[in-house]
Structure formats: C-alpha cells, structure tokens
Image: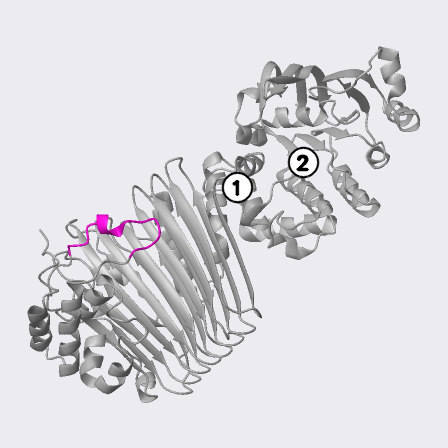
Amino acid sequence: MTTQFVIDGLKAAIDGKEILKGINLEIKGGEIHAIMGPNGTGKSTLASALMGHPKYEVTEGTATLDGEDLLEMEVDERARAGLFLAMQYPSEIPGVTNSDFLRSAINARREEGNEISLIKFIRQMEGKMKDLEMNPEFAHRYLNEGFSGGEKKRNEILQMMLLDPKIVVLDEIDSGLDIDALRIVSNGVNAMRSEERGFLIITHYQRLLNYIKPDFVHVMMQGRIVKSGGPELAERLENEGYDWVKEELGIVDETVGQA
Amino acid sequence: MSTQLTTPTDRQSAEALARSKGEPDWLVAQRGEAAELAGTIGWPKPEKVRIERWNLTAVGRYEKPAAAGAVSELPAIVRELVSEGTENLLVQRNSGAVWKQVAGELSGKGVIFTDLETACREHGDLVQQYLFKAVSKDEDKLTALNAAIWNGGVFVYVPKNVEVELPLQAILYNDDQESTFAPHILIVADNHSRVTYVDCVITDPAAAASPFVHPSIVEVFVKPGAHVRFGSIHSMGETGVDMTIRRAVIENDGRIEWIIGDLNDGNTLSETKSVLKGQGSTSDAKVISVGKNAQQNSLTTQAVHFGKSSDSNMVTRAVMKDSASAIINGITKIEHGATKANGVQTEKVLMLSPKARGDANPILLIDEDDVTAGHAASVGQVNPEQVYYLMSRGISKQDAERLIIYGFLAPVVSEIPIESVRGQLQRLLERKLEG
C-alpha cells in the first residue's frame, strides 16, 4: 500500500488566536509538495501543528496517515507512525551526544530486545554523515549544541535519513544555508525520494525548488492554501513575487494572527 | 532509641574511651578538649538551611569493630563496590576498620594506607603534624564533635616523588545505627607525589531504619608539586544526616581534584574547600547531587586563593525530585596579593517537580585587582521545547526526560577521570533517579 497523507479542514490556534483556518491537502507516496508564501501566513504553524508542538492547539480537522489520525496521537506516537519534521530551529540538548540521541530514536521504533546493534548503527550513521559531508566528530558532540545554522540543518537531514519516515515535512530547511550546504541538503532529500515516501517542503524562497523539484506547489496566505499548481507556479512566484496572487484574490494583508 | 549528644561530648567519657582504645596521650588530650568545646559552641550555619532543625542528636555510641576474615565476609552491598582487582582496600564498618589490604609494593616505597586510629598509634608523630591542621576543631560544634568522637577513618601518606598508580579505595558503611559512625580522613601527599583516593560512604539498607548522624571530616595536604585526586560518593539511607567537611591545603604547584557525588537519601551538609596557599597551585572541584522526597541539601564549594597564579574551577550540578531542596553555594575568595589568580565557578539546579526547590548562590570575594574570575548559575525545570524535540523523533516522554536529566549531569559525570568511580556513580545515580 502506498503512503497516503490527508489533511482535512485543519484549524489551529496559538494562545487562543486562530492561525490555521482550514487546511486541506493530500500527499501520496512519491509526491513532493511545496508550500510557499510570505512570512507570517501560517506555514510554520502548519508544520508545528502536524507534529504536535505543545503551544499549538488544533481546534478542528484531521490529519490521517494511512488512515490513522495523527492528531489523536502524542508527539512521539506521530513520529513512530511515520511523520518526520525537519525543524526550522532545532533544540539544543546539552549533555546528550548526537549518536546516543540517534540510537535512542532508532531504538524507539524497535521492539525491546531487538535494538539495533552498535556496530550496525555506527556503520549506518557514519555512512549517512559521509553523504552529508558532515565531520565525523559531530557524532560525539552534544545534540545541536554550538552547531552553526547550517550544521543544525544537516543534522536534521541526517535524522531523517536514519529514521526512514513515510511523510517528511521540511520547515524552512533552506534558511541560513549557503549554496554548498543547500546542494548537500538537497542531495540528501533527493536520495530519500521513493514511492513510499511523501514530502511537504515549506519555504519562502524558490531557490530550494531548483534543487528539489516539486510535483505540486501551493501558496499559503491568511492561514489557508489560496492557490495550487505545478512547478511553473513556483517559477512565476520567483519572477513576479506574491503581489499578483494577492491582486487576483483581492487580498490586502496576507498575514494571519499578527497583533 | 539512639544515645543523646550529651554522652559522647562529655570530656571525661571522651578521654576514657580514647584511653580504653590505647590512644596516645596527645590524642586523648585533643579529644577531651574537643568534647568540652562541643558542648559550648554552635552548629555550622550554612546559607538558607536551618540544620539545627535536623535530627542531630543520634550520634550513637562507640562499638568495638570485629575484623572481617576476608572480603567475601563483607555484605553484598559492600562487595559490589569493591573495584575489580583492587589491591589497596580499606573498609570501615560503623565505629572502626574491619578490613585492610595494601599492595606490598606500596609499603615498600613508604606509602602508608591504613585506618587513622592505627596511624595515630603507629605513626603518631607524622599524624600529629597534620590532624586538625586544615580544619580546626574549634570552628563549630561539628568540627569539635568529630574531633572528640572520630573513629576508624583513613590515613594516607605518600612520600616524596612516589607516584601511586592505582586508586586507593575505602568503603565506609554503617549497618547499626546505634553505633557512632564518624570517620576522619587524612591524606598527606608529600612533594611531587601523586595519588588517587576514592571512597564510598553507604548504609546497609537491611539495617534497622532509625536516625543516625554521620559527622565526617576530610583533610588533604598537597605538598609542592604533588597531585591528589579525591573521589567520594555518599549514598546513605534516608534516616541519616550526613555532615561532611572536606578541606585541602595546596602548596606551590600542587593540584587537587575533587569529585563528589552527594547521593544520600537523608539531609546533607556538604562543604568542599580548597585553600590555594602556594604559587601556581590549582584546584578542580566537581560535585553532583540528586535529591528526592523531602530531603534537604546544603552543598558548598569554596576556593580561597593566597598563591600567585593559583587557579580554581568549581562545578556543581544538582537534580531535585519531589519536594527535595538544594541550596548550592559557590564561594571564590581571592586574597590580596594573589596576583594572576583565576577562579571560575558554575552552579546549576534542575528541578523535576513543582515542589522541588533549588537555589544557586555564586559568591565572588576579590581583594586583588590583577585577577580573573567568572561565575554562572542557573535554576530551572526541564525545558518543554527540548522534550518536544526529542519526542518528535519517536522517543517517549519518559525517555526524553531521562535523556535530558542525564545530559544535565553528563558534563560532570563524563569528565570523571577515574573509571571505577564513574561507573559506580553512574549506577548509584540511576538507582536514585529511577527509584
């Protein structure tokens, strides 16, 4: 069965203020969807609400992965069900080494008594780190502590590669990356493309989409998806900006929930 | 019930007990004076902790120790702490030493590793030069009490230029709370010697759970160019009160490293102080603590700089569960004339429950201009963003919190240079955190 991820009528609020005003989106295995839009339109809220960040309250709607409603689950259950969010601002965890963390995350998906062997784990981790051109010492560094912005993003992709999720949400994975790092991160994502896996890429720059070719492009404004199309939509946005979309739809202020 | 404090602090009975043990005259006199003092001066007064509200009276009475015939006769909780292949081991049970073994090679080099009572009899002149010279018996009721009633104990002497490779290990335990359990540990590292000493202080949980007090003093003398590593884990039962004063005097280019694990289940007063007397002397102190139930902890690290270019670093990390509290004091004192001295300290408390309490008090007292000093302190709870991040990778909430808590302690635990201490600490930590 191929992966099927369906977001239906999703509404979410932060501190009682509604940010997502009904998101509908369907992603199948093998597809790459991009959500674009200016800052403050609810893109990152969508990512956080799907993952279950404690600050966001889902007020309506469902998000089902292969028929199971993720929104009914705890954060860790969503992850084990196959959802992965590469975060815009990953947390730093002092005292926990990257490799201990990664092994815990892998073992969380395995039965007790069937933990991954240390040798196999190290081989996998080192292989993927090499693909991402990461210095091997990052395995022994404390998780994200003192990592540069680019190093954190690579570390997010490393986690994605090792955890083998069904649905990957990349939240502004390109922010703060130079061209080299952007190429490496994109190669990592492209290497993970498969018929069983769907991607949702959140970005406000088109340049990432030169490296990762989307099948569908959606524009988000005012907490809703206001326009959808193919890759050509991203190109037009890059050339002409967002004003034409606003004009076409009669939108004056595209943001949502800004005080 | 336990014997009241008045009995062992009486001059006559302190002297009589000392004589009955065959102690030298100077020691009999010292105990007598101390006993009298103990009746007149007050308990130590640490910041924000009223220790006089603790049960401080259950000092117990002296119980003559019965030597063990072999390590295998010791209880399992003691045997499991014995480092594998150790050749240098001393065990104190309640009021006295019950087991001693020292590698012949060390004795051949003039190293002394024995209980302090024996050392007073056999090496009286040497011991007398140092006993109660770093800590003075008239500082407060605690120091006077220890001077009057100390028993068993440890004496380490490492002669000039001798390097002791393997750690000297002591295990001090009580399994009878009616008995006085008051060790005094005295370490003298002569010029350019090196030694590592590690101990564990524990209670046999199988013993009756009545109140007891463990008034203990550690004195370390680091002579010029010597290097002492002192590791100590205290894991006594919840009916006990642990009051331990540790102090080192470090001469020119000497170095002390303290590694302290305060993992008692009962109220704890722990003070670890380095007096950096010599030029270029250095001190590094690492303290970790885990508190549970309604336990109160007063944890103080202190560095006093007299020597030019002396250097101190102090790190304390405490995790408080339930309604436990930790008052952590870090005191860096740089005296006038200690030019180019450098003193750094960090105190952090992680609270795992809304009822837990933590207080970090960094204090810098600097009477010299040409110095560097720094401090950092924080008190907080487990960060929900961090929990969310770990959970988003599939790790359960419980495991996520566990990783964060161990991560909080890791900067101290992972840097412990003595593998056996690190392992023991890890094990006792897990027991206390999960328990």
Whether B3 is among the magenta residues is: no
Amino acid of disc 2:
Ala
Q: Residue at x 57, y 53 (%)?
A: A119
Give the label, 1 or 2, closer to the camera: 2
Residue bearing the label numbered 1? A107
Can residue B61 be seen here? The reply is yes
Q: Secondary structure at mark 1?
A: helix
Instruction: Give the residues in magenta.
Output: B45-58
Tag 1, which chain? A
| Residue A54 numbered mark, or none | none
Q: Secondary structure at mark 2?
A: strand
Q: Is residue A89 above or below residue B378?
A: above
Residue bearing the label numbered 2? A86
Residue placed most toward the observer, A225 or A16: A16
Crowdedness near tag 2: few (<14), some (14–19) or many (≥20) residues, C-alpha within 10 Å: many
Q: Is residue B230 above or below residue A160?
A: below
Amino acid of disc 1:
Asn
